[in-house]
Image (cartoon, rainbow, N blue to C red):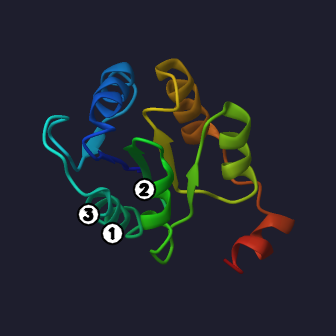
Amino acid sequence: MKKIFISSDHAGYNLKEQIKKNFSKKIKFHDLGTESSKKSVNYPFYAHKLCKKVSFSSKNMGILVCGSGMGMSMAANKHKKIRAAMCYSVKNTKLSRLHNNANVITLGSRLTKKNTAFKCIEAFINTKFEGGRHKKRVSKI
């Protein structure tokens, strides 16, 4: 069974909470923090915490939210077995899954509108890896 982990820093906290609320009837998220937008925290801590959980099983997926999405993406991609994609549109989200077998999506709360973020998450969760010629390429990452 697929597990979906979610985490954010202080800048991404509000969008993280909106994501959980919007998908509450479809998805049981495993929330790894942070717990507030009021206290500044270091995003790498939350990225590393989530990636350790996601990398445990190929069925796991993760959602990371920070101000731009970039910091979380950089920190996440330091982990073996993690392919984090910074997503800003449904098209680039689908391609990250189809061609790159991304298992973590990163979103920028300051750059991505809430409804776009919701659509990206929907695409991320529902798009399957195409395999084929892409499998060989992904194995080289």
Which quadrant would residue 48 be assigned to in this image? Answer: bottom left
What's the amino acid at mark 1? Lys
Give the residue at x 31% y 36%: 28
Q: Are marks 1 and 2 in contact (CB under 8 Å)?
A: no
Q: Which mark is residue 45?
A: 3
Q: Nearer the viewer, residue 10 or 18?
A: 10
Residue denoted by label 2:
72
Residue 139 position within the rendered picture, expressed as x and y whole percent measured from the top left: 69, 78
Q: Are marks 3 and 1 in contact (CB under 8 Å)?
A: no
Q: Nearer the viewer, residue 44 or 127?
A: 44
Give the quarter of the figure containing the C terminus: bottom right
Q: Residues within 10 Å of mark 1 (few under 14, many from 20)?
A: some
What's the amino acid at mark 2? Met
Residue denoted by label 1:
52
Up-down relation of residue 117 to residue 136 (above or below): above
Numbered disc 2: secondary structure: helix
Give the residue at x 50% y 25%: 118
Disc 1 from disc 2: Cα separation: 14 Å
Is residue 91 left or right of 6 when viewed as pictured?
right
Disc 2 from disc 3: Cα separation: 9 Å
Numbered disc 3: secondary structure: helix
Residue 74 seen from this side: yes
Is residue 97 left or right of 135 when viewed as pictured?
left
Up-down relation of residue 87 to residue 82 (above or below): above
